[in-house]
Protein backbone atom coordinates (compact mmCIF):
# COMPACT_ATOMS: atom_id res chain seq x y z
CA UNK A 1 0.00 0.00 0.00
CA UNK A 2 1.34 3.45 -0.92
CA UNK A 3 1.33 5.97 1.83
CA UNK A 4 -1.27 8.71 1.94
CA UNK A 5 0.26 12.11 1.20
CA UNK A 6 -2.86 14.24 1.38
CA UNK A 7 -6.09 13.50 3.19
CA UNK A 8 -8.76 16.19 3.06
CA UNK A 9 -11.87 15.54 5.12
CA UNK A 10 -15.03 17.61 5.06
CA UNK A 11 -13.21 20.79 4.07
CA UNK A 12 -15.27 23.95 4.33
CA UNK A 13 -13.66 27.26 3.42
CA UNK A 14 -14.72 30.81 2.76
CA UNK A 15 -13.44 34.02 1.24
CA UNK A 16 -14.75 37.32 2.47
CA UNK A 17 -17.53 35.50 4.35
CA UNK A 18 -18.60 33.70 1.17
CA UNK A 19 -18.71 29.93 1.59
CA UNK A 20 -16.89 28.36 -1.37
CA UNK A 21 -15.82 24.88 -0.27
CA UNK A 22 -18.69 22.98 1.27
CA UNK A 23 -17.53 19.62 2.57
CA UNK A 24 -14.79 18.49 0.22
CA UNK A 25 -13.13 15.10 0.64
CA UNK A 26 -10.02 14.01 -1.25
CA UNK A 27 -7.34 11.43 -0.58
CA UNK A 28 -4.11 11.37 -2.57
CA UNK A 29 -1.56 8.59 -2.15
CA UNK A 30 2.10 8.67 -3.12
CA UNK A 31 2.58 7.66 -6.74
CA UNK A 32 -0.81 8.95 -7.89
CA UNK A 33 -1.97 11.60 -10.32
CA UNK A 34 -5.38 13.14 -9.66
CA UNK A 35 -7.18 15.42 -12.08
CA UNK A 36 -9.78 17.85 -10.79
CA UNK A 37 -12.25 19.17 -13.32
CA UNK A 38 -15.45 21.13 -12.85
CA UNK A 39 -17.51 24.13 -13.89
CA UNK A 40 -16.21 27.70 -13.64
CA UNK A 41 -16.51 29.06 -10.13
CA UNK A 42 -16.85 25.62 -8.53
CA UNK A 43 -13.96 26.22 -6.13
CA UNK A 44 -11.01 24.51 -7.82
CA UNK A 45 -8.56 27.39 -7.48
CA UNK A 46 -9.97 28.09 -4.02
CA UNK A 47 -8.98 24.55 -3.02
CA UNK A 48 -5.43 25.21 -4.25
CA UNK A 49 -5.34 28.55 -2.40
CA UNK A 50 -6.66 27.09 0.87
CA UNK A 51 -4.13 24.25 0.76
CA UNK A 52 -1.21 26.57 0.06
CA UNK A 53 -2.28 28.97 2.81
CA UNK A 54 -3.06 32.00 0.70
CA UNK A 55 -4.16 35.09 2.65
CA UNK A 56 -7.88 35.68 2.94
CA UNK A 57 -8.95 32.05 2.51
CA UNK A 58 -10.33 30.70 5.76
CA UNK A 59 -11.01 27.10 6.64
CA UNK A 60 -14.20 27.01 8.70
CA UNK A 61 -14.55 23.25 9.16
CA UNK A 62 -12.71 20.05 8.34
CA UNK A 63 -9.25 18.56 8.48
CA UNK A 64 -6.28 18.38 6.11
CA UNK A 65 -3.50 15.92 6.80
CA UNK A 66 -0.35 16.30 4.72
CA UNK A 67 2.03 13.35 5.10
CA UNK A 68 1.22 13.05 8.80
CA UNK A 69 1.14 16.79 9.55
CA UNK A 70 -1.89 18.97 10.22
CA UNK A 71 -1.44 21.19 7.17
CA UNK A 72 -3.73 24.00 8.25
CA UNK A 73 -1.67 24.58 11.40
CA UNK A 74 1.35 25.52 9.27
CA UNK A 75 2.28 28.91 7.80
CA UNK A 76 2.42 29.05 3.98
CA UNK A 77 6.23 28.89 3.93
CA UNK A 78 6.22 25.88 6.26
CA UNK A 79 3.77 24.12 3.96
CA UNK A 80 6.19 24.66 1.06
CA UNK A 81 9.09 23.43 3.17
CA UNK A 82 7.09 20.31 4.07
CA UNK A 83 6.94 19.61 0.34
CA UNK A 84 3.75 21.21 -0.96
CA UNK A 85 4.07 23.03 -4.27
CA UNK A 86 1.52 25.11 -6.13
CA UNK A 87 1.92 26.04 -9.79
CA UNK A 88 -0.27 29.10 -10.16
CA UNK A 89 -3.03 29.58 -12.69
CA UNK A 90 -1.65 33.11 -13.11
CA UNK A 91 2.05 33.00 -12.17
CA UNK A 92 3.10 36.19 -10.40
CA UNK A 93 5.87 38.46 -11.64
CA UNK A 94 8.55 39.43 -9.11
CA UNK A 95 10.49 42.41 -10.50
CA UNK A 96 14.05 42.75 -9.24
CA UNK A 97 14.38 39.13 -8.08
CA UNK A 98 16.16 36.88 -10.54
CA UNK A 99 14.77 33.42 -11.14
CA UNK A 100 18.11 31.99 -10.08
CA UNK A 101 18.30 33.83 -6.77
CA UNK A 102 14.68 33.09 -6.05
CA UNK A 103 15.19 29.36 -6.57
CA UNK A 104 18.48 29.18 -4.71
CA UNK A 105 16.94 30.93 -1.71
CA UNK A 106 13.87 28.69 -1.81
CA UNK A 107 15.98 25.55 -2.15
CA UNK A 108 18.24 26.50 0.73
CA UNK A 109 15.29 27.39 2.95
CA UNK A 110 13.90 23.92 2.29
CA UNK A 111 17.27 22.30 2.96
CA UNK A 112 17.72 24.25 6.20
CA UNK A 113 14.23 23.19 7.34
CA UNK A 114 15.24 19.57 6.71
CA UNK A 115 18.54 20.12 8.49
CA UNK A 116 20.49 19.54 5.28
CA UNK A 117 23.55 21.37 4.00
CA UNK A 118 22.94 24.36 1.67
CA UNK A 119 23.35 23.69 -2.03
CA UNK A 120 26.80 24.59 -3.38
CA UNK A 121 27.09 27.03 -6.30
CA UNK A 122 28.36 24.25 -8.56
CA UNK A 123 25.67 21.75 -7.62
CA UNK A 124 23.02 24.44 -8.00
CA UNK A 125 24.15 25.49 -11.47
CA UNK A 126 24.21 21.86 -12.60
CA UNK A 127 20.65 21.45 -11.31
CA UNK A 128 19.55 24.60 -13.15
CA UNK A 129 21.12 23.42 -16.38
CA UNK A 130 19.67 19.92 -16.22
CA UNK A 131 16.24 20.81 -14.93
CA UNK A 132 15.58 23.80 -17.17
CA UNK A 133 16.06 21.32 -20.03
CA UNK A 134 13.21 19.18 -18.71
CA UNK A 135 10.78 21.86 -19.88
CA UNK A 136 13.10 23.23 -22.57
CA UNK A 137 13.21 26.58 -20.79
CA UNK A 138 15.53 29.06 -22.49
CA UNK A 139 18.57 29.40 -20.22
CA UNK A 140 18.38 33.20 -20.52
CA UNK A 141 15.07 33.12 -18.69
CA UNK A 142 16.75 31.63 -15.64
CA UNK A 143 18.68 34.81 -14.98
CA UNK A 144 15.82 37.24 -15.65
CA UNK A 145 13.49 38.57 -12.96
CA UNK A 146 10.91 35.96 -11.99
CA UNK A 147 8.29 35.85 -14.76
CA UNK A 148 8.77 39.53 -15.69
CA UNK A 149 8.06 39.90 -19.39
CA UNK A 150 7.76 36.12 -19.84
CA UNK A 151 5.14 35.02 -22.34
CA UNK A 152 2.15 33.11 -20.97
CA UNK A 153 3.68 29.81 -22.05
CA UNK A 154 7.11 30.68 -20.64
CA UNK A 155 5.51 31.44 -17.28
CA UNK A 156 3.86 28.02 -17.22
CA UNK A 157 7.11 26.29 -18.18
CA UNK A 158 8.84 28.26 -15.47
CA UNK A 159 6.37 26.91 -12.90
CA UNK A 160 7.32 23.34 -13.86
CA UNK A 161 11.01 24.30 -13.83
CA UNK A 162 10.50 25.51 -10.24
CA UNK A 163 8.79 22.23 -9.45
CA UNK A 164 11.76 20.33 -10.92
CA UNK A 165 14.15 22.33 -8.75
CA UNK A 166 12.19 22.08 -5.50
CA UNK A 167 11.19 18.39 -5.79
CA UNK A 168 7.90 18.63 -3.87
CA UNK A 169 6.08 15.67 -2.35
CA UNK A 170 2.81 17.00 -3.69
CA UNK A 171 2.44 19.38 -6.62
CA UNK A 172 -0.86 21.11 -7.33
CA UNK A 173 -0.90 22.38 -10.90
CA UNK A 174 -3.67 24.92 -11.39
CA UNK A 175 -4.58 25.11 -15.08
CA UNK A 176 -0.98 24.71 -16.12
CA UNK A 177 -2.24 23.79 -19.59
CA UNK A 178 -4.14 27.03 -20.18
CA UNK A 179 -2.46 29.34 -22.65
CA UNK A 180 0.00 26.73 -23.89
CA UNK A 181 0.42 26.04 -27.58
CA UNK A 182 0.39 22.39 -28.62
CA UNK A 183 4.17 21.94 -28.55
CA UNK A 184 4.47 23.64 -25.17
CA UNK A 185 1.63 21.51 -23.81
CA UNK A 186 3.52 18.37 -24.81
CA UNK A 187 6.77 19.66 -23.32
CA UNK A 188 5.17 20.71 -20.03
CA UNK A 189 3.27 17.42 -19.78
CA UNK A 190 6.44 15.43 -20.53
CA UNK A 191 8.18 17.44 -17.77
CA UNK A 192 5.49 16.54 -15.26
CA UNK A 193 5.66 12.87 -16.27
CA UNK A 194 9.42 12.88 -15.88
CA UNK A 195 9.23 14.41 -12.40
CA UNK A 196 6.56 12.00 -11.23
CA UNK A 197 7.71 9.00 -9.17
CA UNK A 198 6.35 6.55 -6.60
CA UNK A 199 7.13 8.86 -3.68
CA UNK A 200 5.38 12.00 -4.91
CA UNK A 201 1.96 12.91 -6.25
CA UNK A 202 0.35 15.44 -8.57
CA UNK A 203 -3.04 17.12 -8.47
CA UNK A 204 -3.92 18.65 -11.83
CA UNK A 205 -6.68 21.22 -12.05
CA UNK A 206 -7.77 21.43 -15.65
CA UNK A 207 -10.69 22.23 -17.92
CA UNK A 208 -9.47 20.21 -20.84
CA UNK A 209 -9.39 16.51 -21.42
CA UNK A 210 -6.54 16.97 -23.92
CA UNK A 211 -4.00 17.48 -21.08
CA UNK A 212 -4.98 14.03 -19.84
CA UNK A 213 -3.93 12.53 -23.16
CA UNK A 214 -0.40 13.48 -22.13
CA UNK A 215 -0.53 13.11 -18.36
CA UNK A 216 -2.45 9.96 -17.47
CA UNK A 217 -4.43 10.47 -14.27
CA UNK A 218 -5.20 7.61 -11.89
CA UNK A 219 -8.36 9.42 -10.81
CA UNK A 220 -10.55 12.12 -12.28
CA UNK A 221 -12.75 14.09 -9.89
CA UNK A 222 -15.57 16.50 -10.61
CA UNK A 223 -15.65 19.46 -8.25
CA UNK A 224 -18.97 21.30 -8.33
CA UNK A 225 -20.40 23.79 -5.85
CA UNK A 226 -17.57 23.30 -3.39
CA UNK A 227 -17.59 19.50 -3.22
CA UNK A 228 -16.29 16.53 -5.14
CA UNK A 229 -19.46 15.08 -6.57
CA UNK A 230 -18.04 12.32 -8.75
CA UNK A 231 -14.83 10.34 -9.04
CA UNK A 232 -13.77 8.02 -11.83
CA UNK A 233 -10.85 7.05 -14.00
CA UNK A 234 -9.58 8.72 -17.20
CA UNK A 235 -12.78 7.66 -18.98
CA UNK A 236 -14.72 10.16 -16.83
CA UNK A 237 -12.80 13.03 -18.44
CA UNK A 238 -13.84 11.77 -21.88
CA UNK A 239 -17.43 11.55 -20.73
CA UNK A 240 -17.31 15.11 -19.40
CA UNK A 241 -15.83 16.36 -22.66
CA UNK A 242 -18.79 14.88 -24.46
CA UNK A 243 -21.61 15.64 -22.04
CA UNK A 244 -20.48 18.70 -20.04
CA UNK A 245 -21.45 18.99 -16.37
CA UNK A 246 -25.23 19.46 -16.41
CA UNK A 247 -25.98 15.74 -16.10
CA UNK A 248 -24.07 15.71 -12.81
CA UNK A 249 -25.20 18.98 -11.30
CA UNK A 250 -28.90 19.10 -12.18
N1 LIG B 1 -10.99 36.98 -3.44
C1 LIG B 1 -12.25 36.61 -3.65
N2 LIG B 1 -13.27 37.34 -3.18
C2 LIG B 1 -14.55 36.96 -3.36
N3 LIG B 1 -14.93 35.88 -4.05
C3 LIG B 1 -13.96 35.12 -4.55
C4 LIG B 1 -12.57 35.44 -4.39
N4 LIG B 1 -11.84 34.49 -5.00
C5 LIG B 1 -12.73 33.62 -5.53
N5 LIG B 1 -14.00 34.00 -5.26
C6 LIG B 1 -15.21 33.32 -5.70
O1 LIG B 1 -15.13 31.97 -5.30
C7 LIG B 1 -15.78 31.14 -6.25
C8 LIG B 1 -14.87 30.01 -6.65
O2 LIG B 1 -13.77 30.53 -7.40
P1 LIG B 1 -12.58 29.62 -7.92
O3 LIG B 1 -11.59 30.52 -8.57
O4 LIG B 1 -12.12 28.75 -6.81
O5 LIG B 1 -13.33 28.72 -8.99
P2 LIG B 1 -12.72 27.73 -10.07
O6 LIG B 1 -13.45 26.45 -9.91
O7 LIG B 1 -11.23 27.69 -9.96
O8 LIG B 1 -13.17 28.46 -11.39
P3 LIG B 1 -12.50 28.59 -12.86
O9 LIG B 1 -12.76 27.27 -13.51
O10 LIG B 1 -13.31 29.66 -13.49
O11 LIG B 1 -11.04 28.93 -12.72
C9 LIG B 1 -16.19 32.06 -7.40
O12 LIG B 1 -17.56 32.36 -7.26
C10 LIG B 1 -15.34 33.29 -7.20
O13 LIG B 1 -15.99 34.46 -7.65
Image (tube, helix red, strand yellow):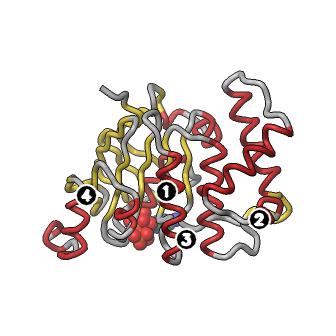
**In the rendered structure, are the residues bearing label 3 and label 2 in contact, judged by CB atoms less than 8 Å apart?**
no
Residue placed most toward the observer, 47 or 239: 239
Distance in Å between CA atoms under marks 3 and 1? 15 Å
Distance in Å between CA atoms under marks 1 and 2? 21 Å
Pinpoint residue 66: horizontal percent, then vertical percent: 45, 33
For discs 4 and 1, the disc positioned in front in the rendered view:
4
Distance in Å between CA atoms under marks 3 and 2? 16 Å
Residue placed most toward the observer, 7 or 162: 162
SS for callout 3: helix
**Disc 1 designates what residue?**
173
For discs 3 and 4, the disc positioned in front in the rendered view:
3
Q: Ligand 1: which quarter?
A: bottom left
Left or right: 14 in relation to 75: left
Left or right: 164 in relation to 176: right
Residue at mark 2: C-beta within 8 A of ligand 1:
no
Residue at mark 1: C-beta within 8 A of ligand 1:
no
**In the rendered structure, are the residues bearing label 3 and label 4 in contact, judged by CB atoms less than 8 Å apart?**
no
Badge 3 crowding class, 10 Å Cα cut-off, few under 14, some 14 to 19, many 20 or more, is some
Badge 4 crowding class, 10 Å Cα cut-off, few under 14, some 14 to 19, many 20 or more, is some
Distance in Å between CA atoms under marks 3 and 4? 22 Å
Q: Which mark is residue 141?
A: 2
**Disc 3 designates what residue?**
184
Badge 2 crowding class, 10 Å Cα cut-off, few under 14, some 14 to 19, many 20 or more, is many
Pinpoint residue 60: horizontal percent, then vertical percent: 40, 45
Q: Could you tell which of marks 3 and 1 lies nearer the N-terminus?
A: 1
Pinpoint residue 209: horizontal percent, then vertical percent: 32, 68
For discs 1 and 2, the disc positioned in front in the rendered view:
2
**Disc 4 designates what residue?**
234
Q: Could you tell which of marks 2 and 4 lies nearer the N-terminus?
A: 2
SS for callout 1: strand
Q: Could you tell which of marks 4 and 1 lies nearer the N-terminus?
A: 1
Amino acid sequence: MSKTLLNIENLHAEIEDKQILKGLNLKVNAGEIHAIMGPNGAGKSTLASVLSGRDGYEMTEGKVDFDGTDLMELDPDERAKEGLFLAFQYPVEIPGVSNINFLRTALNEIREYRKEEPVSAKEFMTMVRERSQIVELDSKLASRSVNVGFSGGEKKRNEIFQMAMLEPKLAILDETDSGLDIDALRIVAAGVNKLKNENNAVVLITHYQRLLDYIKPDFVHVLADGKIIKTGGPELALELEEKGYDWLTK
